[in-house]
Every structure is written in structure tokens, then in C-alpha cells.
Image: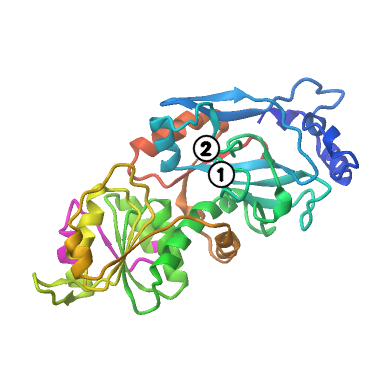
Amino acid sequence: MDCATCTGRAQWGAHRRASHSSDDSSFKISNLYNSENTKGHFAMKQIMLHGANDWRLDDIDEPTPGPRDALVRIAACGICGTDVSYIHMGMTPGHPIPMGHEMAGVVEWLGSEVTGLSVGDRVVVCPSDVGHGPMGTGGPQGGLTPVLYVPDAANGKRLFKVPEGLALTTAALAEPLAVGMQSVNQSEAKPGDKVAVFGCGPIGLFAIATLADRGVTDVVAIDFSHARLDLAKQLGASHVLDPSEVDVWAELKRIHGEVPFMFGPTAATDVFIEASGADSVIGDVLQNGRVDGCLVIVALHYRPVSTNYVNLLMKQFTVRGSMEYPERFEDAIELLERRDLSAVISHKLSLEEFGDGLAVLEGSKDCGKVMITMEGA
């Protein structure tokens, strides 16, 4: 982090005491970092996507925050399969876009109209589009930067406080946890239901952790990685299956039982959560799932998926999509405070090692959450 050498704790304290300026428009981010001994050392940097497979760590212009805005010194920002997909597809709206949407940090400055927060508060940042575009997925801001400009923090939907006992690297899991949590909400799974989770990356693992927290104990985790399956067991899965070693549907019938159907018995699984992104899963679930079953799709499927919708009709199957919402963030933080989920983090890398993080995500079937941590955080 370029600013790590630019200021001492005493200077931070002085800036915190003067956090609200009577003239917000005159504030400069560099004022927080540049002292008479370090003047000129500060630079705003950001991972930017310029096009397909063209990302760069760029110097960016210093924003001018206003009375409704905030600045957050980022401590950690996770990267995920969505970032990999954006990079490969070059999903830019005609101009470079900043990346990073799973972030936590410390409030460094607040505009005069921002209430309910104080400079020095530890926060997670919700990347959802709440009026100024999404963060890290096409909007004008992204979390892979040492200092994040948060527009309209005064709306109360961007910044959520983190308890003092929760490490910020763990708090940065709030966004993917909120995604996994919302998939469980969409499934309406309840104690006594039989659930199968396809894919044990962070989203699938957090769905399993949420199910366990809500008393849903009959959960089958399905993945090709034994390391991920071991973690799924730790987080609450009652059974684990590796599709390269067993017939998944025969095993689901053995574990969950069978339900009669006119074309042959189906697995008695009540709820399926698709967190793998594998094209075949959706059709397989509709073909092999029970009457009145429920499928929640939380993984991104960029390619069209062909399936036989007669199964959907005849089985009266419920299919729902799922994403995170700001309403889930406080629930996610509360669960992170109660239960240690930090084992989902498998790699911690610096901002300059972002490319190595992408390589891990693409090259290792065993990786969990890859976390970018800022120097000095």
C-alpha cells in the first residue's frame, strides 16, 4: 500500500478529530497521507479492467468526496470467479472499470451529512447498486485499491459496522457469505428438509454454513475437491460426494431416499442449491429431482443452458435465482461474529500479487477464498 509509509498513528488521530470539514469540497485524500516528511509519496492505485484479459494496476485520479460521501482505507478485498469471468470476457462499458467487490476496511473520512458512523469505524462495504452503480462489477468504484471512495454513504446502504473482535480479513467474507445466505433464503429450506449443494467454493460453503446455523442438518455437499469437501464437513455438511468417484444421483437416492414418479423413482432431496457453475447441473436436477422440488441457482452461468422443460412442468419444480442484497449484510456480519468461518480463506496476497490470485482461482480446484490484503492492514 503506497500510503503505508506516509503517515504515523499520531497523524491519523489528528485527521480523525477533524474528520468533518465545514467545506467538504476542499478536502483532498492526499491530505490524509502526505506530511512534510512524506510529501509526494502518495498515489491512488486501483486494479482496472481495460478489456478482455487486460487488467492493470493503474494510478488513478484522486476523487473529491462531498458531504454525503466517505473514504474507507481498505484492509482486505476478496477476489472470486466473477472477477475471473469479467476479465476473460472483457466486460467493460466502453471504458476501463475498477475491480473488487468483497471489501472491508476502516473509515478514514466522512462527509458532514453522513450519520451513524465515525472516523475509525471498522466496516464492510456493500457493492450492490444502491444509486451510484455497483462496485467492482461495472460501476465507477471498486475495492481493489488502498483507499476507496464511497459515494452517498449517507444513504445507509453502503457501509456496515464490524464488531471489534472480528478481523477485517474475515469481515471481508461478508459479501460472499451474504450471497450464500441469500441462496438459502430463496430455497426456504427449514429443519427436516433434505438439501444438496452442488459446488463447494466459497458460495457453496457459505450456503452450507448458513443451513447448519439454521438447523438444517441433512445436507449433502458435492464437489471434485476433497479439500473443499473436508471443509464442507467442518461447516455442517452431513455427507460429501465426489462425482469422479460415485454416481451422485444413486448416492442421493441412498442418502435421502426415493420418491415415486411415473418415469421411475427420483431422489427425495427437497432442495438443490447450484453453486458450481457446471452447465449440466440444472438439467440433471430437473431430470432427477422429486416432484415439488426446489432448485436455487446462485452460480453464474454465462452460456445458455439447454434442458427438457417437460420435467419442470410435470414435476411442478420451483427454480429461483439468487444474488446478495444489502439486507443480508448485517445478518452475514452477525454470523461471522458468532462463528469462525475464516478457514474458507485459503490464500492471502498483496495488491501487487493480484495476478497470482487469479492464477490460483483458475488453476487450483482446492482453493477457497483468495483474499487481497493491503500493506499495513
Magenta span has 245?
Answer: yes
Q: State whether residue 286 appears in this view.
A: yes
Q: Amino acid at mark 1?
A: Pro
Direction from residue 21 to residue 332 in the image, left or right = left
Q: Amino acid at mark 2?
A: Gly
User: From the image, which quarter does the C terminus lie in?
Assistant: top right
| Image spot of residue 200 (x, y percent) | 35, 54
Residue at (23, 61) in percent of width and height: 285
216 versus 310 height, above or below:
below
Which label is found at residue 138?
Answer: 2
Residue at (63, 27) in percent of width and height: 45
Direction from residue 148 to residue 99 in the image, left or right = left
**Residue where numbered disc 1 is placed:** 134
Q: Which residues are magenta?
A: 234-251
Q: Are marks 1 and 2 in contact (CB under 8 Å)?
A: yes
Q: Quadrant of residue 191?
A: bottom left
Pick the residue in front: 136 or 228.
136
